[in-house]
Image: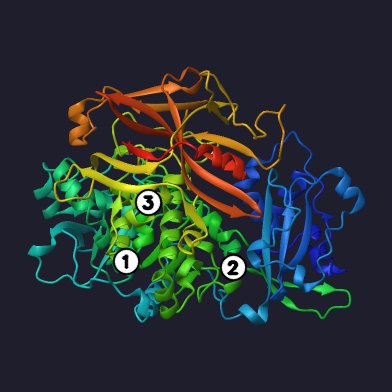
Amino acid sequence: MSPHLCSCCEKIFTGPQSLRLELPHHKAASDLIRAADSGCYICGIIARSSAWKSIDPGVDFKPIWYLAPLSRRQTSCFKLTIDAAPTDEELDRGMMLEDTSDDSQLGSAENDEETFRKPEAPMWAFYLQPAADVEGCVAQSEIPSGLHDARLLHLAKRWLSECTDHSRCRASLPDFRPTRLVEIVSRDQARVVVTQQEPSIDLYASLSHCWGNSKRLKLETTNIDELRAKIRIGELPNTYREAITICIGLDIRYIWIDSLCIVQDSRDDWQREALTMKDVYQNSTVNIAAAASTESTQPSFLSRDLQMIRPLEVSTHWFGQKNLEYYLTNAAIYEDEVERAPLRQRAWVLQEIWLARRNLFLTKNQLWWECCEREACESYPNGVPEAWLSASWLEGHDESSTQQETRWGKLSFVHQRWDSLVETYTSCKITFPSDRIMAFAGIQQHFEEVMPNDDCMAGHWRSRLPQSLTWASLRGRWSYRPVDYRAPSWSWVSMEGPVRFEHNAEEAENGLVEVLCKLLDVKVLCTNPTGGGDLKGGWLTLAGNLTRVGCFNAHLTVQKPDGSFGFIEGSTDDPSDRISKDNWTVVEFDENTKSGEPAGSYLNGLSRDALLSGEFATLPRKVVQMVAWDKKMYSLPIIKWRQEETDWSRGLILCEAVVESQRVFQRIGSFTTSGSVLTSKLMESPQQEIIMI
C-alpha cells in the first residue's frame, strides 16, 4: 500500500493556510488508527511511535494540529505539530496563538516549540520543506528490503567510500591495530587472530551492541585455541552475523567484537584491553552500531516499513498561495530511530559511538550514517537537510576544520563538552556499576590529549577545581553511592545515577563567576600503579568557610548560639518571616531511596592509618535516611555569581568525622542560595583548612 494522506490530514494542506491556529485533527484514537491502517503517512508515524503508547484509552483523544514557519530564516519551510491533548475550551474557541507575524518574534528552529507546548501530552512534529530545496537529498529509487538486498550494502559502501575523502574523518593512528580481531575467512567461517602474528591487516570494523542476557559465544581461556582455529558464523547471534554481512559488503575482512576479542574470564586481559578502547574505536574503519537490538540475538529492522522510509511528497493548495510540492518528514525521526534506541541507553556505548569517526547505525527501521562531515539515512541518502540535522551531530560536526580547531582551542568549550558528556553518561545504564570508570576511560583519554597540561582527578579537571564540585544529582531519579568504593565523595564518579553540572565553564573563564574557596591539594589513588582504571582512595583539601547547618523542608537551617537550629535570618524559607522574595535557600541531597526519600551515606570506621594512606576502598559504607541522620552537617560555599540583578551562590553540604582529633569531611549534598544576604551569612566564619575524602 502506497503512503498517502487521509482526508483529515489533507485538510492541513488545502484551503486557508492556517498558520499558528490550532485546529481539530481526528475526533478519536480509533479514527487515527483506521487512517494509519489505510496508509496515511502522518497517522502511520503517530500510531507507530513510542509516544502513542502513552495515550490513555480511557481518556478522550481529541488532537489538534498547528502549522508554523520553521524559523525566521526559513519561512518557506514549516513545522507541523500534532498535539494529543488540547482542552475542550481551546477547541471551542479555535485558540489563536500569540501573534508572531513580526519576523523578530519568530524563534530559531530549536526554539519553535513556542509557548503552547504542553509537556504532559504527547506531541508529534513533522517538517514540511519545498521539494526544490531537498530534491537532491531525498531517496529517489525503491527502498531495499533489508540487509540481504545488495542495494542496501551498496549504499553503505558509497557512504564509506565518500567518507574516506573527508579530511576530518581520517584515523588519528592509521597503523594502530587491536590486540585481537575476528577474521572473516568466508561467508560461513571466521576465526580469532592475534594481530601481531598476522603479516598484514589493512582495515577493520568495530561493533557496538547490547549484550543482553542470552547465552553467546565468548572468548575464554579454555577455548582460545578453538576460536583461533574456526568460528562457524551461522552459530553466532543475529547481531554478530549482521555485522559480518556488512563487513563483507564493505570489503572489510576484519572486525573487532568485544566478546570475541577480549578474554572474558581473565581480569588482567579485560583491564588491559579496556584501556585501549579509545584507540580501538577511534581507528576502526567504521563502527557498526546495532542500535535497535536489546540483546545480541535480536535482529535489526524489527519495525522496518518500506513505505514509510521515503519522505512523502505532498502538494499544497492554500488559498492565495502558489501551489507547491513539498516533502513531509517525521521531525523526530533521528530521536525515534537512533537517540532513543536501546543501544544509546548503555553506558559503555557512549564512548564507542562518540570516539568512532564513522558510525553505521542499524535501527528498527532503516540504516543511518554518521561521520564528522555527514549525517545521512535511507530517507535522505545524500545527507539529511541542514534544517533538521540532529543536535548531537551539530555539536561541532557542522563546522570547518578551522572553526573546530578554534572552538576546541577554547578551554570553556572543551569543559562544556566534558560536562555534557558526563551528564549523558551518568544517565546511561550499566550492567556492572564497578565498570563506571573504565566505561568512560576512552573519553577521558581523548580529553587528556586535548588538554595535555591538565590532570583528570576522579572525573574533575584540576584546572576547574573547585568550581566543578557544584554538580548535583538529577531530581526525580534514583541516585546512590554504591557499597563498594568507587571514588571520593566530592566526585560525581562516586555516584550511581544521573548528575547535572551547576557551574558555567564559559562564565567562569570570563571572570563572571567568583570562587569562594581555594584549592590547596588534590590527590587520587589508582589501583593500577601505572595510573588509569579503578580508584582506591583520594582526598581534596580546600581553604573555605564552614557553617554548622541543618535542613528543614529542603531549606538550610543554621545553628544558633543556644545550640538550636533555625532558618537563616533574612531568608524567606520561613513563611512567617518574609523580608525579600529573593532571599531563599534550597538543599539537594546527593542520594535517595528507591521510593524517593532523601538519604545520605558515608564511609564508616575511619582510622588514622586510612587517613595517612588515603586508601578507603576496604571501608564499609553506612546509609542513613535523612529523617534519621546522625552526623553533624556543614555548609561550604563554592561559587557565587550575579544573574538578572540577583546574587546566587552554590556550595556543598558536608558531614564530619573526627579521627584522633583530625577532622575530615565527606560530601552528602549541595545547596543553592538566592540573595546576597544568605551568601554573606554563610561566609561569616573564618576560613579554615578542609579535608574531603
Q: To which quarter of the image does residue 325 belong?
A: bottom right
Q: CA distance from mark 1 to mark 2?
A: 30 Å
Q: Earlier in the sequence, mark 2 or mark 3?
A: 2
Q: Mark 2 or mark 3: which is in front?
A: 3
Looking at the image, residue 156 sits to the left or right of residue 513; the answer is left
Q: Nearer the viewer, residue 234 or 470?
A: 470
**Where is residue 290 drawn, in percent x and y?**
39, 55
Q: Is residue 44 above or below residue 14?
A: above
**Where is residue 691 drawn, in percent x and y?**
31, 37
Q: Which residue is mark 2?
A: 388
Across the whole image, how many numbered discs are drawn on residues? 3
Can residue 197 be seen by looking at this rendering?
yes
| Amino acid, disc 1 | Val
Q: Nearer the viewer, residue 155 or 595?
A: 595
Q: Mark 1 or mark 2: which is in front?
A: 1
Residue 450 tag number: 1
**Where is residue 377 drawn, in percent x and y?**
50, 68
Looking at the image, residue 151 sits to the left or right of residue 533; the answer is right
What is the residue that sits farthest to the right in this orientation? 93
Q: Which residue is mark 3?
A: 465
Looking at the image, residue 442 sits to the left or right of residue 615; the answer is right
Q: Nearer the viewer, residue 407 or 614?
A: 614
Q: Earlier in the sequence, mark 3 or mark 1?
A: 1
Tell me if mark 3 has few (under 14), some (14-19) or many (20+) residues whose alpha carbon lies within 10 angstroms of its own: some
Residue drawn at (40%, 40%) of the image = 687
| Amino acid, disc 2 | Trp
Secondary structure state at the residue bearing disc 1: helix
Secondary structure state at the residue bearing disc 3: loop
